[in-house]
Image (spheres, grey):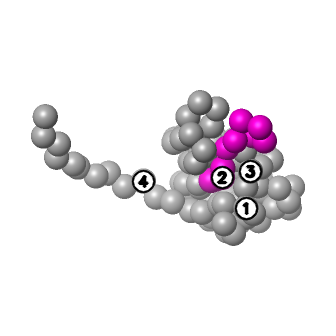
Amino acid sequence: MNQLNNIRMNYKKIINKLKSENESVGEWAHGDFPDELGKVKEVFSKGGEGKGEDWERVYHFIDHDVFISFSGFYSSYNGTDFDGWDDSVTQVTPVEKTITVYE
Protein backbone atom coordinates (compact mmCIF):
# COMPACT_ATOMS: atom_id res chain seq x y z
CA MET A 1 0.00 0.00 0.00
CA ASN A 2 1.31 3.42 -0.96
CA GLN A 3 2.21 5.86 1.81
CA LEU A 4 -0.67 8.24 0.90
CA ASN A 5 -3.17 5.42 1.46
CA ASN A 6 -2.13 5.26 5.11
CA ILE A 7 -3.11 8.91 5.60
CA ARG A 8 -6.78 9.84 5.46
CA MET A 9 -7.24 12.77 3.14
CA ASN A 10 -10.11 15.23 3.16
CA TYR A 11 -11.88 16.61 0.08
CA LYS A 12 -9.51 19.54 -0.32
CA LYS A 13 -6.38 17.35 -0.16
CA ILE A 14 -7.82 14.91 -2.70
CA ILE A 15 -8.66 17.74 -5.11
CA ASN A 16 -5.23 19.32 -4.65
CA LYS A 17 -3.65 15.93 -5.46
CA LEU A 18 -5.74 15.66 -8.64
CA LYS A 19 -4.90 19.25 -9.64
CA SER A 20 -1.19 18.63 -9.10
CA GLU A 21 -1.33 15.62 -11.43
CA ASN A 22 -3.33 17.35 -14.17
CA GLU A 23 -5.13 20.70 -14.44
CA SER A 24 -8.14 19.33 -16.34
CA VAL A 25 -11.33 18.22 -14.57
CA GLY A 26 -12.14 16.08 -17.60
CA GLU A 27 -9.05 13.94 -17.08
CA TRP A 28 -10.45 12.69 -13.76
CA ALA A 29 -14.22 12.87 -14.25
CA HIS A 30 -14.38 9.46 -15.90
CA GLY A 31 -12.86 7.70 -12.90
CA ASP A 32 -9.25 6.90 -13.75
CA PHE A 33 -7.74 8.19 -10.49
CA PRO A 34 -4.11 7.88 -9.29
CA ASP A 35 -3.40 4.70 -7.34
CA GLU A 36 -2.14 6.79 -4.41
CA LEU A 37 -5.76 7.74 -3.63
CA GLY A 38 -6.64 4.13 -2.84
CA LYS A 39 -9.90 2.41 -3.69
CA VAL A 40 -12.46 4.50 -5.55
CA LYS A 41 -15.95 3.36 -6.51
CA GLU A 42 -18.44 5.08 -8.81
CA VAL A 43 -21.68 5.31 -6.80
CA PHE A 44 -23.86 7.49 -9.04
CA SER A 45 -24.08 8.21 -12.74
CA LYS A 46 -26.40 10.30 -14.90
CA GLY A 47 -26.28 11.66 -18.42
CA GLY A 48 -24.03 10.90 -21.32
CA GLU A 49 -24.61 9.23 -24.65
CA GLY A 50 -28.33 8.55 -25.01
CA LYS A 51 -28.98 9.59 -21.41
CA GLY A 52 -29.24 13.38 -21.52
CA GLU A 53 -27.11 16.48 -21.58
CA ASP A 54 -26.72 16.96 -17.81
CA TRP A 55 -23.76 14.76 -16.94
CA GLU A 56 -22.69 13.74 -13.43
CA ARG A 57 -20.57 11.06 -11.76
CA VAL A 58 -20.14 10.63 -8.02
CA TYR A 59 -17.17 8.70 -6.69
CA HIS A 60 -16.60 7.35 -3.19
CA PHE A 61 -12.95 7.57 -2.20
CA ILE A 62 -13.29 4.61 0.12
CA ASP A 63 -9.98 4.82 2.01
CA HIS A 64 -10.77 8.44 2.89
CA ASP A 65 -14.59 8.14 3.15
CA VAL A 66 -15.04 11.16 0.87
CA PHE A 67 -17.69 11.45 -1.86
CA ILE A 68 -16.92 13.75 -4.80
CA SER A 69 -19.26 14.78 -7.61
CA PHE A 70 -17.99 15.69 -11.08
CA SER A 71 -20.61 17.43 -13.22
CA GLY A 72 -20.63 18.73 -16.76
CA PHE A 73 -22.59 18.86 -19.99
CA TYR A 74 -22.75 16.14 -22.62
CA SER A 75 -23.34 16.66 -26.33
CA SER A 76 -23.08 14.07 -29.06
CA TYR A 77 -20.86 16.32 -31.19
CA ASN A 78 -18.40 17.31 -28.45
CA GLY A 79 -18.54 14.69 -25.68
CA THR A 80 -18.49 15.94 -22.09
CA ASP A 81 -17.46 19.51 -21.22
CA PHE A 82 -16.67 20.93 -17.79
CA ASP A 83 -16.67 24.52 -16.51
CA GLY A 84 -13.56 24.15 -14.34
CA TRP A 85 -12.73 22.92 -10.86
CA ASP A 86 -14.81 25.41 -8.86
CA ASP A 87 -17.99 24.90 -10.90
CA SER A 88 -17.72 21.21 -11.80
CA VAL A 89 -16.36 19.47 -8.70
CA THR A 90 -17.99 19.39 -5.26
CA GLN A 91 -17.99 17.30 -2.14
CA VAL A 92 -21.30 15.53 -1.56
CA THR A 93 -22.70 13.23 1.11
CA PRO A 94 -25.12 10.35 0.70
CA VAL A 95 -28.57 11.12 2.07
CA GLU A 96 -31.33 8.54 2.32
CA LYS A 97 -34.81 9.89 1.62
CA THR A 98 -38.19 8.25 1.97
CA ILE A 99 -40.91 9.26 -0.45
CA THR A 100 -44.58 8.40 -0.72
CA VAL A 101 -46.11 7.69 -4.10
CA TYR A 102 -49.72 6.87 -4.91
CA GLU A 103 -50.52 4.48 -7.71
Label count reads 4
Dot 2 and dot 1 residues touching (CB under 8 Å): yes
Which is more foreground, mark 2 or mark 4?
A: 2
* Nearer the observer, 6 or 30: 30
Instruction: State whether residue 32 appears in this view.
Output: no
At 73% from the left edge and 61% from the top edge, which residue is drawn? 83
What residue did someone put label 1 on?
A: 83
What residue did someone put label 2 on?
A: 72
| Residue 9, x across and y down, in percent | 65, 62
Which numbered tag is attached to residue 94?
4
On the rendered image, what quadrant is the N terminus found in?
Answer: top right
Q: SS of the residue at dot 2?
A: strand
Asked if residue 97 is among those painted magenta in the image, a careful observer would answer no
* Nearer the observer, 38 or 40: 40
| Residue 103, x across and y down, in percent | 13, 34
Cα separation, mark 2 vs mark 3, equals: 6 Å
Which span of residues is magenta-colored? 70-79
At 67% from the left edge and 44% from the top edge, which residue is drawn? 74
Disc 1 marks a residue whose amino acid type is: Asp
What residue did someone put label 3 on?
A: 81
